[in-house]
């Protein structure tokens, strides 16, 4: 079997910054869903930036190594035995110890407090949060942690993986100058649709590069989803978390103004429902977009946790979920999606993609709804970003239509708060009076 490629990731520079600025005063906890590339990144970083490293994978380590954490009163003995068990020599201030999948062994996470205070080595933890909370009821969570979220490969990283460093350099220049791409728009959009279909999970990208076959890619994505479903069942044996996750495409395609969990799982007590949703959010497999009750700077202060939309953290996985009723999504479906010729409303896929790209830039997701004058329906602004002391409202349209009634009414209602307004579409960059028509591939530049 050929080796998996190691892709260039933006988080590498963030790890470097942590190493250079913190100098061992904190451990680094990299949080993210399974299979987003946490372990690969950390292993690459440890090999390149340290004289030696020890990686303990708590999914697959010996009882002897686990027992070392039973008694940390003598750290000299702890490090001596750890080196003997792993056959790796540690060098003071030149070595790093990695706790991979630390949620599987919370005692090791608690030990961080003492290990960081000792100061001899650096420490990096990786974890999927889905079981951290349930496994840490009786331990002290260390305050000596710097947290770094990790997401699927973003569009820049995807283009780099395909050997294209030009697109990611040129798009910001077009955006800054307010220029259309012209003849290059059609190819750029097609390239972007490929990212939507393959997604940003490194294994899926690797499968695409190896096979150039989207059905093969789909099989890899199905395997990842099945892994997630197994994780959900370990947390909730009733299968309700699984159903909440699986119902995301159906609820988005129905174009309702919020996710209705009871449609997916039936009647559940409110406190239990909150627990299920929190577990799902902690898994990092989904992105929550909360309704903001007062659209203004500081939207977190007025978010309504009972009204939300839910997206899949990786749009490639979302596409596979949307066609889950087939054993494997045939290449013909992918080919039609790639050419935007599948006879279905693809708006919900584009909306999921925009949500993913906003989160990848480090921003939280908020939306806003308000009733029409006759009260018979709702206007909905898909996303709200804060920019300085003002707002950037966003509406997403997959079709060629550039009507934006909700956006217009929102900007009338909150005119003093709005700085710029954006309609994200599949059309080239243009301006329509006060609205910027933004091609979807420029979404990451909104920050």
Image (tube, rainbow, N blue to C red):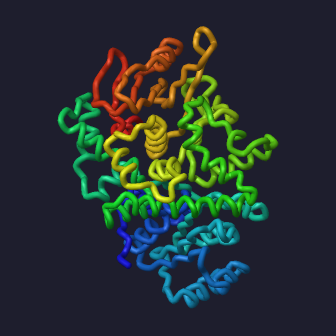
Percent of width and height locating residue 33: 55, 57
Observer able to see residue 108: yes
Q: Residue furthest left?
A: 183
Q: Is residue 171 left or right of residue 369?
A: left
Q: Is residue 267 left or right of residue 414?
A: right
Q: Is residue 383 left or right of residue 5?
A: right
Q: Is residue 325 above or below residue 426?
A: below
Percent of width and height locating residue 35: 50, 63
Q: Nearer the viewer, residue 435 or 47?
A: 435
The quadrant of the image that shows the N terminus is: bottom left
Q: Residue furthest top?
A: 374
Instruction: Find residue 301 and report its image quarter.
Output: top right
Task: Please tell me which residue is depicted at 39% across the width and 41% down the height of the picture.
Answer: 342
Task: Please tell me which residue is depicted at 59% across the width and 68% down the height of the picture.
Answer: 101
The quadrant of the image that shows the C terminus is: top left
Q: Is residue 165 above or below residue 209?
A: above
Observer able to see residue 358: no
Instruction: Find residue 341 and report its image quarter.
Output: top left
Percent of width and height locating residue 248: 58, 44
Q: Nearer the viewer, residue 155 or 94?
A: 155
Task: Please tell me which residue is depicted at 32% across the width and 18% down the height of the picture.
Answer: 432
Report how many numbered discs are placed on residues in the image: 0
Percent of width and height locating residue 293: 63, 25
């Amino acid at each position: 079997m050929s080796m998996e490629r190691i892709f260039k990731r933006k988080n590498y520079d963030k790890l470097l910054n942590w190493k250079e600025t913190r100098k061992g005063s904190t451990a680094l906890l990299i949080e993210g869903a399974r299979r987003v590339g946490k372990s690969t990144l950390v292993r690459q970083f440890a090999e390149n930036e340290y004289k030696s490293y020890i990686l303990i994978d708590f999914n697959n380590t010996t009882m002897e190594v686990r027992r070392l954490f039973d008694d940390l009163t003598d750290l000299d003995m702890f490090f001596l035995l750890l080196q003997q068990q792993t056959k790796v020599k540690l060098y003071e201030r030149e070595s790093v110890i990695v706790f991979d999948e630390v949620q599987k062994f919370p005692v090791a996470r608690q030990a961080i407090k003492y290990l960081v205070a000792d100061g001899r080595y650096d420490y990096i933890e990786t974890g999927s949060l889905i079981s951290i909370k349930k496994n840490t009821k009786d331990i002290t969570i260390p305050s000596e942690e710097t947290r770094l979220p990790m997401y699927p490969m973003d569009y820049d990283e995807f283009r780099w993986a395909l050997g294209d460093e030009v697109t990611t350099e040129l798009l910001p220049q077009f955006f800054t100058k307010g220029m259309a791409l012209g003849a290059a728009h059609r190819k750029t959009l097609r390239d972007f649709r490929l990212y939507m279909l393959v997604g940003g999970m490194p294994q899926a990208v690797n499968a695409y590069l190896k096979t150039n076959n989207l059905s093969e890619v789909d099989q890899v994505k199905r395997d990842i989803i099945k892994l997630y479903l197994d994780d959900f069942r370990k947390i909730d044996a009733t299968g309700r978390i699984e159903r909440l996750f699986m119902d995301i495409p159906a609820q988005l395609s129905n174009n309702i103004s919020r996710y209705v969990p009871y449609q997916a799982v039936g009647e559940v007590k409110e406190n239990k429902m909150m627990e299920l949703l929190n577990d799902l959010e902690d898994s990092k497999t989904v992105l929550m977009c909360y309704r903001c009750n007062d659209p203004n700077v500081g939207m977190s202060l007025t978010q309504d946790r009972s009204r939300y939309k839910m997206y899949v953290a990786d749009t490639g996985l979302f596409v596979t979920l949307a066609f889950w009723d087939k054993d494997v999504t045939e290449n013909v479906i992918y080919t039609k999606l790639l050419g935007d010729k599948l006879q279905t409303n693809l708006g919900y896929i584009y909306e999921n993609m925009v949500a993913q790209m906003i989160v990848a830039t480090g921003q939280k997701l908020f939306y806003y709804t308000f009733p029409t004058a006759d009260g018979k329906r709702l206007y909905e602004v898909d996303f709200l970003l804060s920019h300085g002391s003002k707002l950037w409202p966003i509406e997403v349209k997959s079709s060629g239509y550039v009507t934006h009634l909700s956006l217009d009414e929102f900007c009338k209602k909150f005119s003093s708060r709005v700085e710029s307004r954006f309609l994200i579409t599949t059309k080239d960059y243009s301006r329509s009076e006060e609205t910027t028509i933004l091609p979807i591939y420029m979404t990451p530049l909104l920050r």
